[in-house]
Image (cartoon, rainbow, N blue to C red):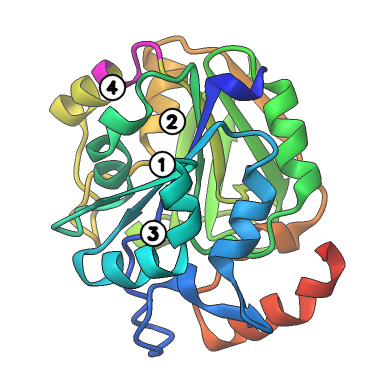
Amino acid sequence: MPADRLCAVIPAAGRGTRLGLGVPKIMLEIAGGVTVWHLLHRRLRPYAEHVHVVMSPEGEGPFRALAASEIASGAVSVSVQETPTGMGGAIFGAAPHWEAYGAILVVWGDQAGLSPVTVDRVVEAHEKGLTLPLVPMPDPYVEYELDDDGTLTRVRQSREGDECRPGGLSDVGVFCLSTEGLREAWTRHLDEAAVGAHTGEVNFLPFLPYLSRERGWPLTVVPVTDPDEARGVNTADDLEFARRAYARWV
């Protein structure tokens, strides 16, 4: 799809409490002044006309300072999620910033291991509906179930108490969605969706099978072979892993 029709959206309002470092995860340093933000921006800018980042109230000021030149140029914008209601709330609360584009590329704000190859393949594959890069995992934290017709029927989430099966398909923190009818579909989903058993949130991930199963959105799966791409930065071990892996994509 043409790059001028794509807006990248990065929900980064999480506080990274498990890391105990006192900064948003997107601002974590990976190597020599290079942060997760710098890595993600480097991956996304060849494809996205615009990048929008959703921050927490306390993270907004520091992030604006970090990305000052990109924001000043108009290539990057920032909004604030005042209350931590989950990724869906962050993405759709920022809808005025992305609705004018033909598609959004949602990328979690801690995906330091995301490869440029995956971004390229997802953007190239996306035509309409929903495009997901998925990778088989020995022990998935999130598992995507598809039926024989290629419809996404369910997303299991360990964080909500679901049991994910060994070898199941997991995402790599990247989701490409057409914007036509997207906000309306989310509003309808909110009317019907149950809150997560553990988080109490209306999560973003169950919205994806809703689009595929209930709304009939076409689904394109982009196979990913490296399970390391699914690893976000959630713990000190994850951060060290991201630092070791950085050299692969420099």
Residue position marked by numbered label 2 in the rendering: 208
Query: What's the CA distance linking mark 3 and mark 2?
Result: 20 Å
Residue density around tag 1, few if under 14, some if 14–19, many if 20 or more, within 10 Å: some
In magenta segment, residue 65: no
Query: What's the CA distance linking mark 3 and mark 1?
Result: 16 Å
Residue position marked by numbered label 4 in the rendering: 183
Residue at image point 36% right, 63% down: 64
Residue position marked by numbered label 3 in the rendering: 12
Nearest to N terminus: mark 3 or mark 4: 3
The amino acid on which the numbered mark 1 sits, given as a three-letter code, is Leu
Q: Which mark is residue 205?
A: 1
Query: What's the CA distance linking mark 2 and mark 4?
Result: 13 Å
Residue at image point 80% right, 55% down: 226
Nearest to N terminus: mark 4 or mark 1: 4
Residues at discs 2 and 1 in contact (Cβ within 8 Å):
yes
| Closer to the eye: label 3 or 2 | 3
Q: Position of residue 51 (x, y in %)?
A: 48, 42
The amino acid on which the numbered mark 3 sits, given as a three-letter code, is Ala
Say whether residue 161 is visible. Answer: yes
In magenta segment, residue 183: yes
Q: Please tell me whether mark 4 sits on a helix, a strand or a loop.
A: helix
Which image quadrant: the N terminus? top right
